[in-house]
Image (spheres, grey):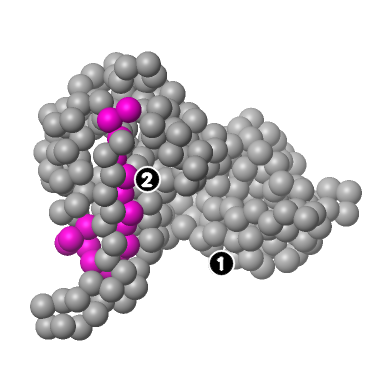
Amino acid sequence: MLQYTVDFKRKQTADNIPRIEGVIMNIMICDDQKSELENMRQIVSEYALSHSELSLAVKCFLNPFDMLDEMSKSGVPDIALLDICMPGILGTEVAREILGKSEENTDVIFLTTSSDFAVEAFALHAGDYLTKPYTKQRLTDTLDRVIEKRRRRLYIPVSCGKEIHRIDLYNVLYAEAKNHSVEIHLKSGKCLKTHTTLTELKNTFQTANGFAAVGASYIVNLRCVQSLLETTLEMSNGDCIPVPRRLRAELKKQYFDFYTREATGK
């Protein structure tokens, strides 16, 4: 394993004024070609130097199995840069391992010589798919976009019995009040059961844009609504949420207003 760390928590500027301590992000890079790995390492290193508000910890691997082994010890990365055609295992399979363990909280960027895996990569919700050779600017732009998206995310603690889970609000499909508890359905297919009330969750979810109450039993992530049907909302996982007649017009307005704001940035 090749490994190095970039840490800019308190980087000094030219005028000797320390930067504010920033967001800590763990990045793992894997490519079985040493020259390609070094190129990625260099670009990420230079990116870190020019973004001193961030704190980046970067680990580089020539062997994908070494990367998976490191993940089992130190946890999944926030961002993974993966080659696809590697000996013993494809980068898409490595991505599935990562996403399964992180409940889709890891942003995966694929960098490969082939366009053959593009459809599969985006089915995995890849942050980007770069074909080699790519330019430094192309990878830098991707890092800008992915990191900015991560910085906008909101995480909340959810108490489930004796366990506490930290979840990314944007990975929530919907929450449903059921039998004196609330079930939180995640994009990964996992369902968390908590005795927190739906009203309490609604107040928490309101800290993030894009959530709407549907009657007294549901809160939905509008980003994950596949279709607005006459009597139901069809979610991206195929689940259908019943919509009371009296709420249909208002919910439709919320849905279109949300996507108008997303499109215009207002």
Task: Measuring from the top left, give residue 201's x and y in whole percent.
Answer: 69, 62
- Which residue in the structure is indicated by mark 2? 79
Task: Measuring from the top left, give residue 147's x and y in whole percent.
Answer: 33, 54
Q: Is residue 21 above or below residue 96?
A: below
Q: Quarter holding the C terminus?
A: bottom left
Q: Earlier in the sequence, mark 2 or mark 1?
A: 2
How many numbered marks have been drawn onto this rendered protein structure? 2
Q: Which image quadrant is residue 236 in? A: top right
Specify start and end residues of the magenta stretch as a single range: 48-63
Q: Which image quadrant is residue 70 in? A: top left
Q: Give the residue displayed 30% in from the left and 49% down from the top.
A: 58
Q: 59 and 154: which one is in front?
A: 59
Q: 76 and 96: which one is in front?
A: 76
Q: Give the residue displayed 16% in from the left and 46% down from the top.
A: 43
Q: Give the residue displayed 79% in from the left and 54% down from the top.
A: 161
| Label of residue 91 in the image | none
Q: Residues within 10 Å of mark 1 (few under 14, many from 20)?
A: few
Q: Is residue 152 above or below residue 182?
A: below
Task: Name the residue type under label 1.
Answer: Thr
Q: Please say whether residue 63 is visible from this viewpoint.
A: yes
Q: 19 and 61: which one is in front?
A: 61
- The reply to whether the magenta stretch includes residue 172 is no
Q: Give the residue displayed 49% in from the left and 30% down from the top.
A: 97
Q: Is residue 133 left or right of residue 243?
A: left
Task: Measuring from the top left, give residue 48's x and y in whole percent.
Answer: 22, 57
Q: 155 and 250: which one is in front?
A: 155
Task: Name the residue type under label 2.
Answer: Ile
Q: Is residue 63 left or right of residue 206?
A: left
- Which residue in the structure is indicated by mark 1? 207
